Amino acid sequence: MESLAALLPFLLIGAVFYLLMIRPAQRRQREAQAVQRSADIGAQVVLTSGIYGRVVTTTDEDVEVEIAPGTQIKVVRQAILRVIPEAIPDSAPGTIPDTPESLTDPTPETDTDR
């Protein structure tokens, strides 16, 4: 019974280490794999080296990225750090206007109390 009581602190330290270190690392790894799988042809990506480009072709393990017009590099899929979302056009509904003039109501108000 004493030997079991002596092992209890080590078991608790191991459990805390697992909860604080290993589980979050596994979660980050799953998220990175999901981002790498989501990089489809035409997607804008940032590589781990800091290079921006557009995905041209993909295989299970490799991706060809166009980094300049006519310049393509072949990298492993794990080199994709993130996928850049496509920009929302300025004319999309719900966008914030850029100029104060666009904030005014285009229909003139008439004073009917006169």
Image (cartoon, grey):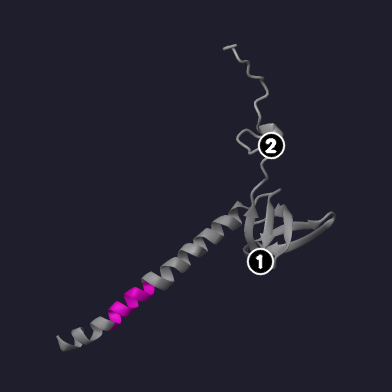
Query: Measuring 77% from the left and 62% from the top, which residue is drawn there?
Result: 73
Q: Amino acid at mark 2?
A: Pro
**105 versus 79 height, above or below:** above
**91 versus 62 height, above or below:** above
Which image quarter: residue 79? Answer: bottom right
Which image quarter: residue 98? Answer: top right
Q: Which mark is residue 48?
A: 1
How far apart marks 2 and 1 lie (CA) works out to: 41 Å
**112 versus 6 height, above or below:** above
- The number of callouts visible is 2
Question: In this orientation, which residue lies closer to the viewer: 98 or 18?
Answer: 98
Q: What residue does disc 2 label?
A: 100
Question: In this orientation, which residue lies closer to the viewer: 40 or 46?
Answer: 46
Main SS, magenta residues: helix
Picture coordinates of residue 90, whole percent (x, y): 70, 38
Magenta segment boundaries in residue numbering? 10-18
Picture coordinates of residue 74, whole percent (x, y): 74, 62
Question: Disc 2 or 1, which lies upstream in sequence?
Answer: 1
The quadrant of the rendering that contains the C terminus is top right
Query: Measuring 37% from the left and 73% from the top, which residue is drawn there?
Result: 18
The quadrant of the rendering that contains the N terminus is bottom left
**11 versus 24 height, above or below:** below
Question: In this orientation, which residue lies closer to the viewer: 101 or 83?
Answer: 101
